[in-house]
């Protein structure tokens, strides 16, 4: 499975998990891939599952370095941030269902890359912008920690 396919499956998994849509069957290999990616980035960033449960409960992103580095790790592992810390959300346009394209285009145009002091802060500021423009993104991103 290539990176773009994995990104697509991650997004679909998060969407179906959050919305409870059961008509889309999520392949078991994808679920384990998402969990593996999450676990890798939790370990690499020092973030905790409790942090994400709090985010899920409050809907607020705390100014937390571990959270910032978790976000950078995920973007990096799925190929959406480059070595210069430029976020390439537009890379999703060619692989997403047509219904998602206007949202991606709007986020890409409105938010672009929000530069921070380092890659972690850049990822955080950029994702924070996405969430402010489309609040559902927070629930989709952090639904893995709902239980």
Image: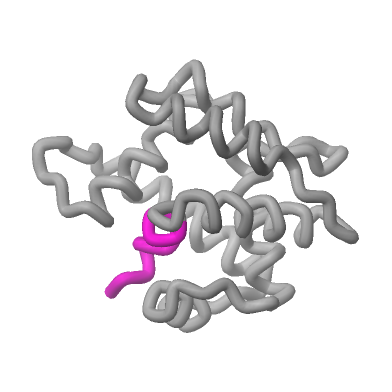
| Residue 78 found in image quarter | top right
Q: Depth check: give the residue in front, 74 or 140.
A: 140
Estimate the x, y position of residue 65 in percent, counting from the top left: 73, 74
- Name the residue: 68% across, 32% down: 88
- Name the residue: 62% across, 34% down: 108
- Name the residue: 63% across, 70% down: 67
Q: Which residues are magenta?
A: 138-147
Residue 35 visible in image: no
Q: Is residue 54 left or right of residue 48?
A: left
Determine if the magenta segment contains residue 90.
no
Q: Is residue 32 above or below residue 2?
A: below
Q: Is residue 111 above or below residue 138?
A: above
Q: Is residue 81 left or right of residue 78?
A: right
Image quadrant holding the N terminus, namely top left
Estimate the x, y position of residue 101 in percent, counting from the top left: 44, 25
Estimate the x, y position of residue 71 in percent, counting from the top left: 63, 57
| Residue 11 found in image quarter | top left
Estimate the x, y position of residue 119 in percent, counting from the top left: 81, 53
Main SS of the magenta part reads helix
Residue 68 visible in image: yes
Residue at the left extreme?
23
Q: Depth check: give the residue in front, 132 or 67.
A: 132
- Name the residue: 31% across, 46% down: 15
Image quadrant holding the C terminus, namely bottom left
């Amino acid at each position: 499975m290539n990176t773009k396919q994995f990104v697509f499956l991650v997004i679909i998994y998060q969407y179906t998990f959050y919305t409870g849509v059961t008509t889309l069957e999520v392949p078991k290999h994808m679920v384990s891939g998402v969990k593996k990616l999450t676990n890798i980035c939790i370990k690499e960033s020092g973030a905790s599952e409790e942090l994400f449960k709090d985010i899920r409960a409050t809907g607020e992103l705390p100014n937390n370095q571990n959270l910032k580095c978790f976000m950078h790790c995920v973007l990096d592992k799925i190929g959406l941030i480059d070595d210069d810390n430029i976020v390439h959300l537009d890379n999703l346009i060619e692989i997403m269902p047509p219904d998602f394209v206007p949202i991606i285009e709007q986020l890409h145009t409105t938010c672009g890359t929000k530069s921070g002091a380092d890659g972690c802060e850049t990822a955080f500021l950029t994702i924070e912008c996405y969430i402010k423009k489309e609040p559902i993104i927070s629930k989709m991103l952090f639904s893995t920690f709902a239980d």
